[in-house]
Image: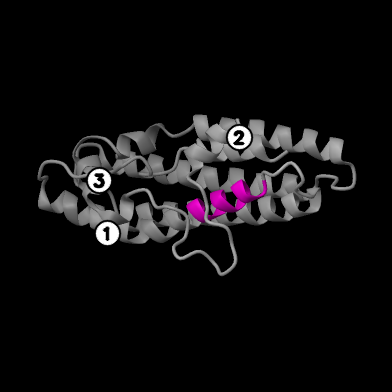
Amino acid sequence: MNKKLAAALSGGAVLVLTLSGCSDDSDNKVDDWAKKVCDQVQPQLQKIADANADIQRQTADNSKPADVQATDSAAFQQISQAYKALGSAVDSAGPPPVDDGETTQKEAVKELNASSAAYAELKTKVDALDTKDQAKFADGLKGIADELNKISTSGDQALKKLQSGEVGTAMAKQKGCQKPTASSPPPAGSPAPASPSASASKKA
């Protein structure tokens, strides 16, 4: 019932989640800017990864609608807050010291805030689902998964630009901007989270 939601969430575009590895040396000012952003970014990326893992855990066919609703609602709230904090991190760092840096920064902040609002709206919709009727609940969840797909495939042009060129190279060097795994160590008694891509492919 929650499988499509988990698959859609694992495919979501998140600032600098795709960055990894090191590259050529770039300008020190750009490196300084990247460090300023990435130091604030890592805790938020971790929150998103953890929320994703929580949704993954509720993908069993025998999951109760009320449990799925509570998990998804809390996860969307956490992701919404993380995106808002990501927007604040990029905003407070100031424009990156590159061509069109101010424009790219403003557009990226705008996109992150829009994503935060979109996930807050998804939380509201999950909260409104009827958990007493499993068929209706499943249909409602499918609609939310469709909306999640739209969120993850639109409105990330400025983020992609922010991750490209000299700025992208500098951010890729920062550990804080590299993709996290679900929380380590996991809470006592919780199952070890699978990687989003592996879970999504197994449950597709």
Closest to the observer, 23 or 27: 23
Q: Quadrant of the N terminus?
A: top right
Q: Position of residue 120 (x, y in %)?
A: 63, 49
Seen in the picture, residue 198 relative to 181 is either above or below; the reply is above
Kind of residue at badge 2: Lys
- Dominant SS of magenta comes to helix
Residue that label 2 marks: 203
Closest to the observer, 17 or 161: 17
Kind of residue at badge 3: Ala
Label 3 CA crowd tier, 10 Å (few <14, some 14–19, many 20+):
many
Q: Earlier in the sequence, mark 1 or mark 3?
A: 1
Way the structure is coloured: one colour
Indicate the secondary structure of the residue bearing disc 1. helix
Label 2 CA crowd tier, 10 Å (few <14, some 14–19, many 20+):
some
Q: Is residue 80 left or right of residue 129?
A: left
Q: Please give the label number shown on residue 36.
A: 1
Kind of residue at badge 1: Lys
Q: Quadrant of the C terminus?
A: top right
Closest to the observer, 187 or 166: 187
Q: Which residues are magenta?
A: 48-58
Q: Position of residue 189 (x, y in %)?
A: 60, 67
Name which residue lies at 47% across and 55% down: 182
Q: Earlier in the sequence, mark 2 or mark 3?
A: 3
Name which residue lies at 48% across and 33% down: 155
Question: Which mark's residue is nearer the viewer, 1 or 3?
Answer: 3
Q: Earlier in the sequence, mark 1 or mark 2?
A: 1
The answer to which quarter of the image holds residue 40 is bottom left
Q: Please give the label number shown on residue 172.
A: 3
Q: Is residue 19 left or right of residue 185?
A: left
Question: Which mark's residue is nearer the viewer, 1 or 2?
Answer: 2
